[in-house]
Image (cartoon, rainbow, N blue to C red):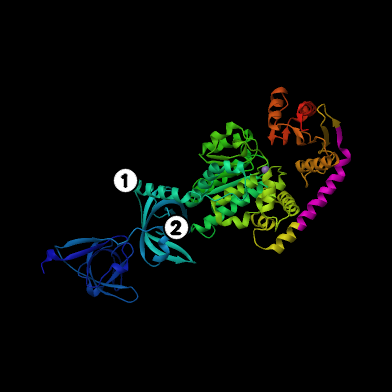
């Protein structure tokens, strides 16, 4: 054989032991020395030993060397001998790895594969670097190791399109790829993969067209926008974008958010992410005020930015429900827009048109001729079914609880109640709503994910659900009775020019403070009692403190947000803000202007039309 016919193999970075053949000649590199010989690397992952009896010349570390494989031992050790040839042909060998979809990885355990996708997260552990890769079919963690705690492939960045070649492993029942190489694609390669993934993801994220739980013209008209939000949420889940779900901290807001929470968590789990991904990719949080406060956005931003820096996460998608459609939310949206955080809103508060420029989607019954009677819990549950129809059995009773909790007078309330009548009577729904309000009072800013599931009978432990709700209702009622016995004797009555009966209660001095029920609910309870006592008459109740008032009304056609805006202009120095629903809302002012503001407010109420 002529020297020039001798073939020397150079193994690529992706090759492993399976690519090494006995009697074959390889190009290698001297790695180090021992008493009995020297170690030679055939690539970064494969090394063999040249026994000193098989060494032909002197070498130093990192010298190129040509070796022949004498033997591959059963334990994987490779015996080499040095060969000296001057003329030869080099053949580069790369691992033959076909590019496959992430959801096909399960059939390739132990094999070397290639996947292409977008880098959705880069997390440095004390061991390997974990890259989360997303393609059109799923999400996959890829471990890459150079040295403990050292970032592997530092040139690869978040949102890059990459090709990963590695071995499919099973760790703790979860698939993982141990990467040999991760290459960031550029130019046409990158564009082709990105377009392929985007197109497929877009189709995959499209929600199924399923009928509503009940007949409703208003909700049916909202279907396109509900589908839009469902698609945005599905896409966020499929691309491992964190989701923050914010909601008003009352029974309606909780029902809406919990329905969506169940849909999202189930979808995260289905999409093959980590066992705890539903904790780091999803967060539900109540907003204390009936809007998205600066305090809320500040917390959300603070955590998101830290997660972004610390765990290499994407910036979140924020969903607001039973909140988010009024001018009061604007300051927070402005802050969020600095960071390009996308917002989608599901709300039934009277929307201010100025808000829509901050939102990527907005479901609101007022947009299609409906009103607040279609509660956030009804809308949230329907959106949740579009996000993930499989969770329907868990959440189909939530709209009934929400409707009762928010005192909806829309025909849909009765339809949602009828849907679950077998298991949940109207009184049961009322009790669950009260239990939610009471528990949220103690939870304060926490979401109480698992406790709330028990209250809503989602955990599947009906004994615990029944016991817990009964106990919470009992506790709530004791405290409500206590509050009512203290404040009812102090209610002041006035007759208004329009025939409405006005009742005033100073909740600051005639009610217990910092306890349950808080001022808003206290005023609501007072109002309910007075409505009963004044059957047939229009009734307005104002519960006020030093710098706020809470309004409830029956049979008076008010527009609280508009009254607040007018008062803001009419009373300079009143420091007036507020809003809410048309007939249930609140107003804030400066303490020194209280009497002026309240009298002006009462004047407006007295001029409003009453229902005959
Ligand atoms: Mn509501």
Range of magenta residues: 470-493
The quadrant holding residue 130 is bottom left
17 left or right, relative to 533: left
Q: In this view, does 365 lie to the left or right of 119?
A: right
Q: Quadrant of ligand 1?
A: top right
Contact (Cβ within 8 Å) of mark 2 with mark 1: no
Does 262 appear above or below 227?
Answer: below
Does residue 478 belong to the magenta stretch? yes
Q: Determine the residue located farthest toward the right in the rendered image.
A: 489
Q: Which of 450 and 26 is in front in this view?
A: 450
Label 2 neighbour load within 10 Å: few <14, some 14-19, many 20+ = many
Q: Residue at x 86, y 37 (%)?
A: 491
- What secondary structure is the stretch in magenta mostly built from? helix
Q: In which quarter of the image is the N terminus?
A: bottom left
- On-image quarter of the C terminus: top right
Evaluate whether residue 501 shows in this view. Answer: yes
Q: Where is residue 451 in the image (x, y as percent from the top left)?
A: 68, 57
Q: Which of 340 and 472 is in front in this view?
A: 472
Question: Label 2 vs label 1: CA separation?
Answer: 24 Å
- SS for callout 2: strand
| The one of 64 and 138 positioned closer to us in this rendering | 138
Residue 199 is marked as none
Residue at 56 percent across and 35 percent down: it is 356
- Residue 342 x/y as whole percent: 52, 41
**Badge 1 element:** helix
**Is residue 135 magenta-colored?**
no
- Quadrant in the rendering for residue 87: bottom left
Residue plotted at (80% across, 55% down): 474
Mark number, residue 188: 1
Q: Name the residue under label 2.
A: 140
């Amino acid at each position: 054989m002529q020297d020039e016919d001798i073939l020397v193999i150079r193994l690529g970075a992706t090759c492993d032991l399976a690519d090494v053949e006995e009697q074959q000649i390889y190009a290698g590199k001297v790695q180090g020395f021992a008493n009995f010989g020297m170690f030679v690397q055939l690539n970064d992952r494969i090394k063999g030993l040249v026994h000193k009896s098989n060494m032909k010349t002197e070498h130093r570390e990192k010298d190129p060397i040509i070796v022949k494989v004498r033997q591959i031992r059963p334990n994987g050790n490779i015996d080499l001998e040095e060969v000296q040839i001057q003329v030869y042909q080099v053949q580069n060998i790369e691992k033959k790895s076909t590019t496959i979809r992430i959801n096909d990885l399960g059939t390739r355990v132990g094999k070397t594969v290639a996947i292409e996708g977008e880098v959705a997260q880069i997390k440095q552990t004390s061991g390997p670097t974990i890259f989360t890769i997303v393609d059109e079919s799923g999400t996959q963690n890829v471990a890459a190791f150079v040295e403990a705690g050292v970032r592997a492939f530092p040139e690869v960045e978040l949102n890059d399109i990459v090709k990963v070649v590695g071995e499919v492993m099973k760790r703790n029942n979860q698939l993982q790829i141990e990467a040999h190489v991760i290459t960031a694609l550029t130019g046409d390669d990158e564009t082709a993969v990105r377009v392929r993934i985007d197109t497929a993801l877009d189709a995959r994220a499209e929600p199924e067209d399923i009928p509503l739980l009940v007949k409703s013209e208003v909700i049916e008209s909202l279907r396109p926008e509900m589908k839009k939000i469902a698609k945005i949420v599905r896409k966020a889940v499929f691309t491992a974008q964190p989701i923050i779900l914010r909601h008003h901290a009352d029974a309606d807001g909780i029902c809406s958010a919990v329905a969506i929470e169940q849909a999202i968590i189930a979808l995260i789990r289905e999409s093959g992410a980590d066992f705890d991904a539903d904790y780091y990719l999803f967060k539900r949080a109540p907003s204390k005020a009936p809007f998205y406060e600066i305090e809320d956005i500040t917390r959300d931003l603070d955590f998101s930015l830290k997660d972004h820096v610390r765990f290499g996460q994407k910036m979140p998608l924020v969903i607001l429900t039973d909140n988010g459609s009024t001018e009061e939310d604007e300051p927070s949206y402005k802050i969020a827009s600095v960071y390009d955080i996308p917002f989608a809103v599901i709300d039934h508060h009277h929307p201010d048109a100025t808000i829509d420029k901050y939102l990527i989607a907005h479901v609101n019954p007022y947009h299609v001729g409906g009103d607040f009677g279609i509660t956030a819990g009804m809308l949230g549950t329907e959106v949740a079914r579009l996000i993930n129809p499989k969770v329907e059995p868990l959440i189909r009773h939530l709209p009934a609880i929400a409707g009762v909790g928010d005192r909806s007078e829309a025909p849909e309330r009765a339809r949602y109640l009828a849907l679950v009548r077998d298991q949940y009577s109207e009184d049961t729904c009322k009790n669950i709503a009260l239990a939610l309000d009471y528990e949220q009072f103690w939870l304060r800013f926490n979401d109480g994910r698992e406790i709330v599931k028990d209250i809503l009978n989602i955990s599947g432990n009906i004994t615990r659900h029944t016991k817990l709700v009964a106990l919470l209702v009992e506790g709530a009622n004791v405290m409500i009775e206590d509050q009512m016995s203290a404040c009812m004797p102090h209610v002041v009555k006035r007759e208004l020019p329009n025939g409405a009966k006005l009742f005033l209660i100073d909740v600051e001095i005639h009610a217990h403070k910092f306890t349950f029920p808080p001022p808003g609910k206290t005023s609501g309870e007072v109002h309910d009692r007075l409505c009963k006592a004044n059957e047939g008459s229009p009734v307005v109740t104002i519960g006020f403190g030093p710098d706020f008032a809470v309004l409830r009304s029956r049979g008076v056609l008010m527009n609280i947000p508009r009254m607040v805006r007018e008062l803001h202009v009419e009373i300079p120095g009143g420091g007036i803000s507020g809003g809410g629903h048309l007939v249930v809302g609140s107003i804030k002012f400066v303490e020194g202007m209280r009497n002026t503001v309240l009298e002006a407010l009462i004047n407006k109420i007295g001029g409003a039309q009453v229902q005959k």
